[in-house]
Amino acid sequence: MSLLKLKYKRLLVGVLTIMTLVSCSSPWDERQEIDDANLKVTLDVAITNMAGTSEFTKLLVETGYDTILAASKTYTVFVPTNEAMAQVDSAILNDPEALKEFVGNHIALTAFSSVRGTEETQIKMFSTKYLVFKGATLIDDATIVNANHYAANGVFHVIDKALTPKMNIWQYINSKAATSAMSDYLLSLKEFSIYASDITSKETAAASPGIYSDSLSNSYLKNVYNLNNEKNSYTLFLMEDDGYNAEVDKMKPYLIKKSNDPAIDSTAIYSKYFTLRDMAFGKKYELNNLPATLTSRFGVEVPIDKTQIVGQPIRLSNGIVYIMKKVDVSLAKRLLTKKIEGENNSGYWGSRNKIFYRDKVDPFGVFYNDIMVQDPGKAEFTLMYKDKDFFSTKYKVYWRAINDRQANVFQQRLRIGGKWAVVNTVTTQIGVLYDVPLTNVELNNYTEVYLGEFTLAQAIDIDLISLVAANNTVNGNNSLTLDYLKFVPEIK
């Protein structure tokens, strides 16, 4: 028993020693041991006591931030030297609203020591901008020259450059209005809705106006990336007019749309959208890390030719903009093959308990999901699908349909387009764009089957694509199965 007690005591001593070492490793805890008069005063007073920063101290008082820094919450302040303040644009200093944002861009809630466990920390400032604290010495593009001055309610660091708030990418686009055709189009999408769902968002934004209302009301920000979002980082390629217009013209034959209003050129509007949706990326790429090819969130591979970059990259609060002479994307990359997964049906006509969603492994060891309707007890059981953004061109159609649960071949058909209607008291589909005849689903065939082709005169959303079982009630002969549908567009 005494031996156990001895071991326990040694273990306890060891744990206490480790806890002591860990507690001493925190710079914030170490401040308690520093004989510093600032620890007895709040940040507003402590900053006033710092030599060489009086110009910024005056602005704290002028904007009322001195009162905030006297509160009981914990803050971090990055304090520019007087020399740094001498470089600040007088237009900011003479505009009360801009001045308040400027001072707030130096203050963050919560204490951030220069000794941290992470290499980079994204910090939200009182200006609502986010700045990156890099390593031990850099905040945004300013260098910390005198670090870790602790006060009773936080910490401040002296920096060699003022943290003037930068525009975000959306603000920059607004600043280019009337000088950039691409910017003008992006801004116009506040008035034009690309999708029906955009209309609801615009109504919501109209009911709650503010500086971020564009995030809802602009169809580009809603459907591509919210370039008004300060928290995330983006890369945008902003093409000069000639290159932009050339890319748009390439897309026009594939986005033919008729408008009810003769004053609206829908073909041009949609050609511009489908060109520009691939010009924004959800990550900031500095020039030295800019890859030769980027893939947009819509799956389009975009070649990045650095020789087409005009001037220096424009670094903004939420990312980076490259002015490009052109970004030449081939039609083979733009016109993506559509693949509709069988298990992602949007509806059905029949009984739900006859539908089976399956997790399978094919004979080649590849995992896949599919859907199967077995023994439905009715004729023409139907699975329904839909997809948007079909181009105005010819499509070749394929399916992969796995018949692995029964011993006989059965047939199914595909109907593309149309709508449900009651004709002579019978519910049926009318206005079908293309009707694939009954096609055999062979036993254990894991290859794609070519079904035919159809042409769209206009670019449309297809809200009804129907996989239809044979018109008989004999179980085994009226099954359905689908791994996926594939629609391959043709380049004209």
Image (spheres, rainbow, N blue to C red):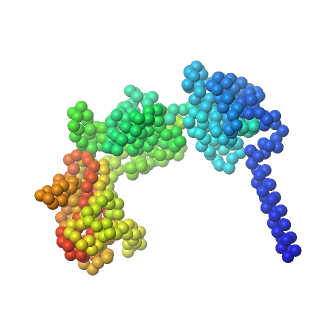
Assign the N terminus to one quadrant of the image.
bottom right
Q: Quadrant of residue 46?
A: top right
Q: Is residue 236 left or right of residue 7?
A: left
- Whether residue 454 is visible to the viewer of this picture, yes or no, is no
Q: Is residue 138 left or right of residue 268?
A: right
In the image shown, does 148 or 302 lie closer to the viewer?
148
- Whether residue 457 is visible to the viewer of this picture, yes or no, is yes
Residue 227: x %, y % from top left: 46, 39
In the image shown, does 386 or 288 lie closer to the viewer?
386
Q: Farthest residue in the left direction?
A: 424
In the image shown, does 319 or 49 lie closer to the viewer?
49
Residue 102: x %, y % from top left: 59, 29
Residue 53: x %, y % from top left: 71, 27
Residue beneath the point at 71% across and 24% down: 54
Residue beneath the point at 46% across and 32% down: 210
Q: Quadrant of residue 101?
A: top right
Q: Farthest residue in the front direction?
A: 425
Residue beneath the point at 24% across and 66% down: 381
Q: Quadrant of residue 149?
A: top right
83 relative to 238, above or below? above
Residue beneath the point at 70% across and 37% down: 72
384 relative to 225, above or below? below
91 relative to 330, above or below? above
Residue 104: x %, y % from top left: 61, 31
Q: Is residue 96 left or right of residue 84?
A: left
